[in-house]
Image (cartoon, rainbow, N blue to C red):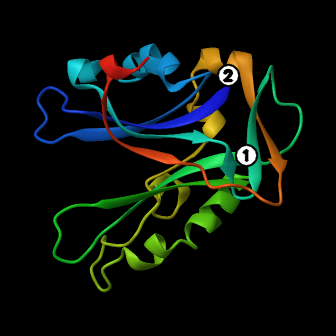
Amino acid sequence: MKLFMVLLGSKAPKRNVEQHDFFFGIAEKLGDLKQQFVGFWPEAGNSLHIDGWREINFVDGYRVDIMPGENHGNNKRIFFINLGGYTSGKLEEQHYTLLTVQDDRMSALKASKLTVFFRTATIKGLKGADAHIDEKYGIDVDEIYRIEDLLSPETKARWHIHLTAVENASVDEVHLGYLKMGQLG
């Protein structure tokens, strides 16, 4: 089994622009997640598609394995962080996502603040135009989640993520491009 990170897109009803969200799931192959995509974003209807995906094998010097049952080991967890920020003269919020292996949310938060995006996606002197993480954490980052918390209850009941420190971790391949649900195997 494999852990997948999937960028879903949709031109949902009554929306002027395409919207996106990230989905995390465990399956043998990407196509096995099709019904979970639909259940995750039912209001997307027939416009639901994939704009990119990644099989998560390595993060921050850790190999990622999927094991049956509950996790009874390592305290380290994979965190998904969605940073938001601004560029002067652009009427949009830019986003930067990252995965990081940490012991807790505060450590993940600290890691996110070390990114080039966090340090540069701020308009100096303009209140409210700073790079941010979700306000509920007392700072400004859009979202920060443990990957386990983003998996479906059915998936969590069957599988857990096991992390092993490795010296020569590869970089996961990122697959970009428009993929209709009907094109999945």
For the C terminus, the image quarter is top left
Question: In screen coordinates, is 19 left or right of 71?
Answer: left
Q: Residue at x 29, y 76 (%)?
A: 127
Question: In screen coordinates, is 167 left or right of 112?
Answer: right
Q: Residue 47: where, in percent of width, then height?
A: 22, 25
Q: Residue at x 35, y 23 (%)?
A: 41
Question: In screen coordinates, is 89 left or right of 177?
Answer: left
For the N terminus, the image quarter is top right
Circle 2: residue type? Lys
User: Gap between marks 1 and 2, in whole Å?
Assistant: 14 Å
Q: Residue 151: where, in percent of width, then height?
A: 58, 28
8 up-or-down from 130: above or below: above
116 up-or-down from 33: above or below: below
Residue 22 location, quadrant: top left
Residue where numbered disc 2 is placed: 156
Question: In screen coordinates, is 152 left or right of 143?
Answer: right
Circle 1: residue type? Arg
Q: Secondary structure at mark 2?
A: helix
Q: Residue 136: where, in percent of width, then height?
A: 49, 52
Q: Residue at x 67, y 22 (%)?
A: 156
Residue where numbered disc 1 is placed: 77
Q: Residue at x 82, y 30 (%)?
A: 71
**Does label 1 or label 2 sit earlier along the sequence?**
1
